[in-house]
Amino acid sequence: MAEILTPGDENDLANIIAEAVTAGAPLEIRGGGTKAAVGRPIQTAGVVSTSAMSGITLYEPRELVLSARAGTPLVEVETALAENNQELAFEPLYLEMVLGEPAAPSTIGAVFASNLSGSRRIYSGAARDHFIGVKAVNGLGELFKSGGRVMKNVTGYDLCRGLSGSWGTLAVMTDVTMKVLPSAESSQTIVLTGLIDDIAIDAMCAALTTPYEVSAAAHLQQSFVARLSDPELSALGAPLTALRVENFSSSVAYRIGKLGEALKAFGDISVLDEDWSQIFWSDMRQLKVLQGSSDPLWRISVPPKSGAKVVESIKAHHPTCQAVYDWSGGLIWLVMPPISDAGASEVRRAVAASGGHATLIRADAATRTAVDVFQPLEDGVTALSGRIKAAFDPHGILNPGRMYAGV
């Protein structure tokens, strides 16, 4: 087992990376290790964990800005925000139980390194849109920083966006600054039951065209509904389509009523009150309905109207695959049967036909070695990615090959 190194600050980290460059010893970069099973398996001489670089370094509720060291547990950040009725508006996902029992809590640095956003992305934007400042160490052991405490401080290259979704292959973040927003006073959710996938997507897309500010839109096939936390919802015995509205209490009641009227052609409507609504969307953040399995899991992003067609195309080859739709059909969590290539050929073909991208989130090491885990890049993008990698990490020390072979 590779040695786990836990630098206490950026200077320790810089020294570790500089020594690794001298020794030609690549390093695996991780926070709490909750997402270590995402990506291609890599062979390294050691593991660097940012977990010891922890703590909120700046929080100004009136300015809606928070800075924290990269190894700070996500739950610690969200607890501090909740005490001031604020939140990370993009609803970062908790993947722990989907990928297996974690060694440590998910960290705020990993939130931005993976750029995985929850159901509210369609309303509030992605994680990278709230990432406004960073300190990091590159693959030469050099400390750098970008951005600041306000969006207008970003000049030159926006390295926050460049590092978002890079999965530790370009640099190791040591401190991150983010925009935060007030939490909604009230939340209610409209539920439609019994809709097939394509009709459910029509309903979700119709809801998003209304002026009633739908902040989340998801559809669960019947087999997944049975896994929900709430016993009344889990006993429905039918597919479930959920549309969330958040705002001041009086406004939510009005908007829910109007939205229900706008969607009455799609069938009977019920409303989840504040408590039920919170429980349901908490399940979505934790991907509860996808837990308890080791079957391959894909995260597919396509134009919303194409969601059902993509799944049907894949089902033609793998009839037992199952899907959870989020982002009004634009995000698909697809569970495949346990086959050798995780259905990669059919997934890639279906995604190419509709436009979009797919990432293999859960699979065994042999499968993640044999197939492309992240969306294959076009030749020009591959060359550009190689140049960016060479600029940040010319010796290939940081998570080499985790996203793409040779990068």
Image (cartoon, rainbow, N blue to C red):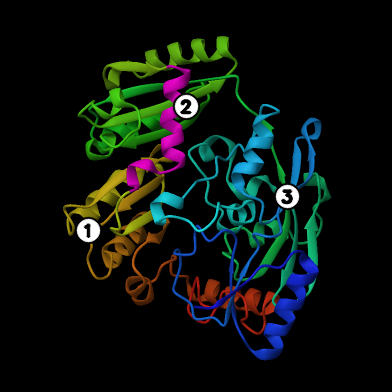
Residue highlighted by disc 1: 337
Tell me what residue is drawn at x 60 percent, y 82 percent.
Answer: 26
- Decide whether residue 283 is among the magenta residues: yes
Position of residue 7 in the picture relative to residue 273 (left or right): right
Q: Tag 3: residue type?
A: Gly
Q: Tag 2: residue type?
A: Gln
Position of residue 166 in the picture relative to residue 391 (left or right): left
Q: Secondary structure at mark 3?
A: loop
Per the model, the C-alpha gap separating discs 2 and 1 is: 31 Å
The quarter of the picture where residue 110 lies is bottom right
Residue highlighted by disc 3: 55
Q: Is residue 13 above or below residue 321?
A: below
**Image spot of residue 90 (x, y percent):** 57, 40
Circle nearer the N terminus (2, 1): 2
The 10 Å Cα crowd at callout 2, few under 14, some 14 to 19, many 20 or more, is some
Q: Tag 1: residue type?
A: Pro
- Decide whether residue 94 is among the magenta residues: no
Position of residue 242 in the picture relative to residue 266 (left or right): right
Specify start and end residues of the magenta stretch as a single range.
273-291
Tell me what residue is drawn at x 43 percent, y 28 percent.
Answer: 279
Per the model, the C-alpha gap separating discs 1 and 3 is: 41 Å
Per the model, the C-alpha gap separating discs 2 and 3 is: 27 Å
- The prevailing secondary structure element of the residues shown in magenta is helix
